[in-house]
Image (cartoon, rainbow, N blue to C red):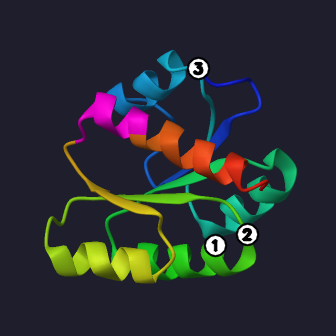
Amino acid sequence: MPSVAERILIIKKELPLEGEFTMALIEAGFSLACVPDYTEALFSLDVLKPDMIILNHTSEDSMEMCRQLHAAFDTPIVLLGEDSDPNTWQRAVQAGADFYLTKPLKYGETIARVKALLRRYKDKGR
C-alpha cells in the first residue's frame, strides 16, 4: 500500500473528481487532487508537489500539455486516452509520457503500472 506521501495530480476537464478509476486509486491508498487545465496544474504542482501526474485528456492539447509538464518537472506522467492507434502511443511517449493507457481502463493493471512507475522513480532518488 502506498504511503500517504504518494500524491497523484489528475488533470481532467470534467470536474469534480469522481468515477471508478479515481475510486480505485483512492482504495489503493493514493491521495488525489484534480484540476481542469494546464494553468491550474502549474499552480497545483508548486503547492501539492505530487508524486505523479495523470493527464485525463483526449485532445491534441494533451500532447502539448504533456510536453510542457515533462520539460518543467521531473514527475512521472501517465496519459489516458481513447485512441488505441499505435501512433498515438508513440506520440504520447515522445511528448514525455511514461505510459499511454487507453480507455476503458483495466483498473488492476493500471494501479499496478502506477505503483511500478512510482517505485522506479523513488529507486532513482527522485
Mark 1 touches mark 2? (CB < 8 Å): yes
Instruction: Give the residue at the far right of this rendering.
Output: 47
* Secondary structure of the residue carrying numbered label 3: loop
Marks 3 and 1: in contact by CB < 8 Å? no
Amino acid at circle 1: Leu
Membership of 47 in magenta stretch = no
Give the mark, 2 or 3, whose residue is nearer the N terminus.
Answer: 3
User: Which residue, given by chain and number where applicable, does mark 2 sit on?
Assistant: 73
Q: Residue 86 carries which label?
A: none
- For the residue labelled by badge 1, is the local secondary structure a helix, a strand or a loop? helix
Q: Where is residue 1 in the image (x, y as percent from the top left)?
A: 58, 18
- On screen, residue 89 versus residue 113, left or right, reads left
Can residue 52 be seen from the camera position used here?
A: yes
| Residue bearing the label numbered 1 | 69
Left or right position of 114 against 121: left
Q: Looking at this view, name the residue that lies furthest to the front.
A: 123
Question: Which residue is pictured at 31% across the width and 28% down the height?
Answer: 108
Which residue position is annotated with label 3?
Answer: 29
Q: How crowded is mark 2: few (under 14 residues within 10 Å), some or many (20 or more)?
A: few
Image coordinates for residue 105, horizontal then vertical, percent: 25, 41
State the quadrant of the C terminus.
bottom right
- Estimate the spatial distance between the alpha carbons at disc 1 and disc 2, rounded to whole Å: 6 Å
Taking depth in this image into account, of 20 and 126 the one nearest to the observer is 126
Which range of residues does the magenta coloring cover? 105-112
Q: Do the residues labelled 2 and 3 touch (CB within 8 Å)?
A: no
Question: Magenta stretch containing residue 107, yes or no?
Answer: yes
